[in-house]
Amino acid sequence: MAQAMLLHRRGQADQAREICNGILEREPAHVAALNLLGIILQASGRHKLAAKTLSKAVAADPLDAACHYDLAFSLQALEQEDEAAIHFKQAIALGARLKATEDLILRNPAVTTCIDHIEEKWPLPVRPDELFARHSLQSIAGDLYLRCALTTVPLHRAPLEKLLSIIRALLLRSAVSDFTTSDGAIVRLLCAMAQQCFINEYVFAQSEEETRQSTQLRDVLLQRLRDADAVPPMLLAGVAAYFPLHSLPLARMLLDREWPEIAAEIVQQQVGEPLQEAADRKSIASLTDVDDSVSLQVMQQYEENPYPRWTINPVVVRDAAMRAGSTRSPDGEEILIAGCGSGQHAAEVVQRYPQARVLAVDISLPSLAYARRKTREAGLRDIEFAQADILKLGTIGRTFDRIEAVGVLHHLAEPETGWRILVSLLRAGGEMRVGLYSEAARTGISGIRAFIAERGYRPTAEDIRKCRQHILRDSDEARWRRAVESPDFYSMSGCRDLLFHVMEHRFTIPRIKAFLDEQKLAFLGFNADPRMIERFQARFPGDEAMVNLDKWQAFETDNPLTFRRMYVFVVRKN
């Protein structure tokens, strides 16, 4: 297979094809051979046979993102767009962890040419006639993969955001001038843009003219709803690209109408799902009061901006490395997820340990409602969600075999106080997985937080947009790199959590070690990037070094970005 791939890269497609056919004679379901053979057939324009071959690859491994993408490419060439969209979205979902979505979008020369032109003039504005001089907007509007990405995941590249912001403004102008247009590609692109803006919580910057035009369009939509007049998809999408539809006074009326599929997706996303979450809030149990002053401020933040607003339903965990750090199977045992947020972590845990009984608590009801809806959609029903403050969990009268507290303790007024409470709920021999911000890795973010405080930016949507634009327009890129490179920078809730959090503590390895010694907890190891583990082991060989915090401290001192996201580690209660 390696030889076939090498020959293909060298342009020797016939020889590569012969090798693939030889492999498939011996092993008909060999995924890599099927995929490469499909790509070779695509290159020669034989898309019907390529689609047949790639369908076999997908059947052999439904979790291979590349196979779905390549199959979708041939289906699109065969003008089977609906089926192609299904596989494009599956590829995006499966490849989300690889952050490849944006790279695949940039395969479109129209997109890259426009981005290059914007970057050349940045931060000066670009006139639309200049931007689309070489490639028309239609060449972007007709990009099915781009539209699928816009409707599926938040996109995480600053240059791409700049282009999308300009396109949104152009599409708004088109909607204002003629929202009855029959230009299908433009309508579909604006519908996809509306879904992307809802996913990223309207984090894109907008001009005063856009605010005026979008407000004008919103008033037209409301009047048409009052008068029971027709609402063309272009009108609906133009409003939905600037305002969440569930915030409109007549939002429920949108659910009572028949919509074409592209508009129906917007209505379900922006009205149907938020109403489901509002109904769920009423049935979520409350295990404790929330009256600590800092807890109340944190609760307000996550009620206004539940985080993370994950869109991809989790897939079955295949990689055994996902279980790293655990020395026992908690199947059939009890797990507490302290600070579950919007439920993404809970979904991963319940898949990893399907026989466990899981209690997931958080202080934010909107976050819990989001979690219930998303896990219900994923078919994950064995999770008990409840509202509770970690500082009062000692009153619930329950203990657990395993506790997950990733990304929550550093947002308490006194992290060690909350951590001690969780330790008291852990049964003897039980394990706890903890995630804490690293002082060393967080230095860049700390500097940006100080800048935000100096400038007086508030944690409001308007100020977050202004702050982001300041960062994107500043020529001192190194100062802002840690923020701009973070996926959290590209959504409203993510940016607020990253840069505007009401309470943040940062830890060092000695501080962690002191707590573990105090509580007599055994350190079982970090969940770190495999490449970083290899570098650590090259310097400190042997299994004992992996659980030696003094050696990890020495390594982090020389490699301060080792725990870029946070320290994530497992301990055992002796």
Image (tube, helix red, strand yellow):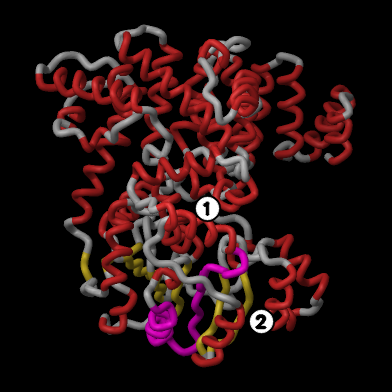
Instruction: Point out residue 252 in the picture as x, y percentages from the top left corner.
Output: 16, 33
Q: To which quarter of the image does residue 188 belong?
A: top left
Q: Which residues are magenta?
A: 414-441
At horizontal 57% and vertical 16% (from top left) the residue drawn is 131
At horizontal 39% and vertical 83% (from top left) the residue drawn is 417
Q: Which secondary structure lies at badge 2?
A: helix
Q: Amino acid at mark 2?
A: Leu
Q: Which residue is mark 1?
A: 316
Q: Amino acid at mark 1?
A: Val
Instruction: Point out residue 306 in the picture as x, y percentages from the top left corner.
Output: 34, 53
In the drawing, does residue 80 fall left or right of residue 177? right
Q: Which residue is mark 2?
A: 549
Q: To which quarter of the image does residue 339 belong?
A: bottom left
Instruction: Point out residue 219 in the picture as x, y percentages from the top left corner.
Output: 19, 22
CA gap between label 1 and label 2 equals: 33 Å
Instruction: Point out residue 464 in the picture as x, y percentages from the top left corner.
Output: 40, 46
Q: Is residue 257 above or below residue 66?
A: above
Instruction: Classify mark 2: residues with Cα within 10 Å, few (<14), some (14-19) or many (20+).
Output: some
At horizontal 24% and vertical 21% (from top left) the residue drawn is 216
In this view, the residue in front, 109 or 412, is 412
Q: Which secondary structure lies at badge 1?
A: loop
Q: Earlier in the sequence, mark 1 or mark 2?
A: 1
Which residue ends up furthest to the front in the rendered image? Answer: 454
Q: Is residue 416 magenta?
A: yes
- Whether residue 74 is visible to the viewer of this picture, yes or no, is no
In this view, the residue in front, 288 or 1, is 288
Q: Is residue 567 magenta?
A: no
Q: To which quarter of the image does residue 28 belong?
A: top right
Which mark, by number, is residue 1?
none
At horizontal 26% and vertical 74% (from top left) the residue drawn is 292
Quarter containing the N terminus: top right
